[in-house]
Amino acid sequence: MSGIIQMLRKRKELIPLVSIMAVAALGAPAVSLYFLLTKPDVILNKTSNPEPWERLDPSKPQKLHTINQQWMPIAELEYIKSLTK
C-alpha cells in the first residue's frame, strides 16, 4: 500500500487513472447487488419459482420510461393459462 502511495506521489498523472479504476472496481459489485436485491425480474433460484413473471404487478411499469402503457389481458393467453393450471 505504501508503495502505491509513493508511486502516486512521484507520478501525479496516474492519480485520475487510479481513481477511475477504484470507482469502477467498487461500483460494479455495488450496482450488481442493487439490481439483485431491488429488481423483481432478477432471480437466483429458478427451482423455487419457475415462472417469476407471474408475480409482477401489471399496473406497475417495469421500464425506466413508459409511454401510454395500458394493460389488458389477452384472451388466448388466459385460456392457455387456465388449461395449464
Image: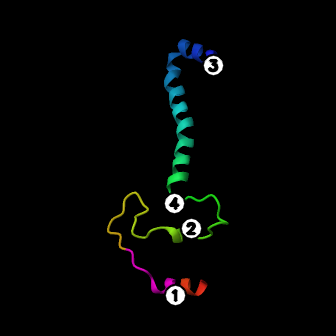
Q: Quadrant of the C terminus?
A: bottom right
**Between discs 4 and 2, the one toward the N terminus:** 4
Please identify the quarter of the rendering in which residue 52 is found: bottom right
Name the N-terminal-most of marks 2 and 1. Answer: 2
Viewer-nearest of discs 3 and 4 = 4
The stretch of residues the image draws in magenta is 71-78
As drawn, the label of residue 52 is 2
Helix, strand or loop at mark 1:
helix
Work out whether residue 74 or residue 11 is closer to the camera in this orientation and state it.
Answer: 74
Q: Amino acid type of disc 3? A: Met
Mark toward the start of the polypeptide (3 vs 1): 3
**Which residue lies under the disc numbered 4?**
40
* Rendering colour mode: rainbow
Mark sitting earlier along the chain (1/4): 4
Compared with residue 60, is residue 83 higher up or lower down, i.e. above or below?
below
Say few, some or many: other residues with alpha carbon within 10 Å of mark 1 (under 14 / 14 to 19 / 20 or more): few
Q: Quadrant of residue 8?
A: top right
Tell me which residue sits at (54%, 31%) in the image. Answer: 22
Q: Which residue is mark 1?
A: 79
Residue drawn where x is 50% and y is 16% of the image: 12
